[in-house]
């Protein structure tokens, strides 16, 4: 299992619009899309930076994964997403190595990517997302 690059870094924020303004004005980068991912109870804002992206995440439900994360930790880095080829085989490989899969099968995430999360308790406290490379 070898990621090709970091697809994005997810940052949990309380106020998406305020965070977008901050990243655009301070770092001079442009938000390319804002999207609601209903199944994950989040609104996302994407900022491409070279080959990777920053994904800002605002919860739409205090009981959703980002809502619970912010309640416990406050705002900050929520997950790191690795871009991989052939995500289903990668998941099978990781499962055989005893890493708990939050998503046993890939599902659609922001920007229509096929994604799956690995459990942070099996990854040194870091929530890792796999994203399938678009071909
Ligand atoms: N990074 C590191 N640790 C995390 C974490 C994160 N982002 N989210 C939760 N945890 C830890 C908690 O701190 C907690 O640790 P302790 O047991 O030591 O207190 C433990 O995991 C359990 O957390 P919880 O808040 O009780 O929540 P759940 O067990 O119900 O869920 C998790 C945890 C990771 C399975 C769930 O958040 C999940 O399924 N995440 C994947 C989906 C997701 O995050 N979606 C939002 C982004 C969507 C997108 O990018 O499109």
Image: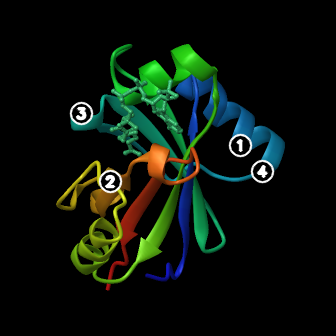
Residue identifier under label 1: 24
Is 7 in front, or is 98? Answer: 98
Crowding at dot 3, Cα within 10 Å, few <14 / some 14-19 / many 20+, comes out as few
Residue tagged by mark 4?
28
The secondary element bearing badge 4 is classed as loop
- The mark nearer the N terminus, 2 or 4, is 4
Q: What is the secondary structure assignment of the residue under circle 3?
A: helix
Sequence-wise, the earlier of marks 2 and 3 is 3
- Picture disc at residue 128: none
Q: Are marks 2 and 1 in contact (CB under 8 Å)?
A: no
Whole-Å distance between the Cαs marked 2 and 3? 24 Å
In contact (CB < 8 Å): disc 2 and disc 3: no
Q: Which of marks 3 and 4 is nearer the N terminus?
A: 4
Compared to 57, does 15 lie above or below? above
Kindly identify the residue that appears in the image at 24 percent across and 73 percent down. 92
- In three-dimensional space, the C-alpha distance between marks 3 and 4, rounded to whole angstroms, equals 29 Å
Ranked by sequence position, the earlier of labels 3 and 1 is: 1
Q: Which residue lies furthest to the right in this view?
A: 26
Q: How many numbered marks does the figure carry?
A: 4
Q: Which labelled disc corresponds to residue 38?
A: 3
Residue 60 percent location from the top left of the image: 35, 20
The residue indicated by pointer 2 is 100
Q: Specify the quadrant of the image occupied by residue 16.
A: top right
């Amino acid at each position: 299992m070898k990621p090709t690059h970091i697809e994005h870094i997810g940052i949990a924020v309380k106020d998406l619009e305020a965070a977008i303004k901050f990243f655009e004005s301070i770092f001079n980068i442009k938000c390319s899309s804002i999207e609601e991912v209903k199944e994950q109870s989040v609104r996302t804002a994407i900022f491409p930076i070279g080959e990777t992206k920053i994904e800002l995440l605002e919860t739409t439900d205090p009981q959703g994964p980002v809502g619970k994360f912010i309640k416990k930790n406050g705002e900050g880095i929520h997950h790191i997403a690795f871009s991989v080829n052939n995500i289903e085989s990668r998941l099978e490989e990781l499962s055989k190595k005893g890493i708990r899969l939050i998503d046993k099968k890939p599902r659609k995430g922001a920007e229509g990517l096929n994604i799956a999360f690995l459990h942070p308790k099996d990854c040194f406290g870091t929530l890792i997302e796999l994203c399938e490379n678009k071909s």
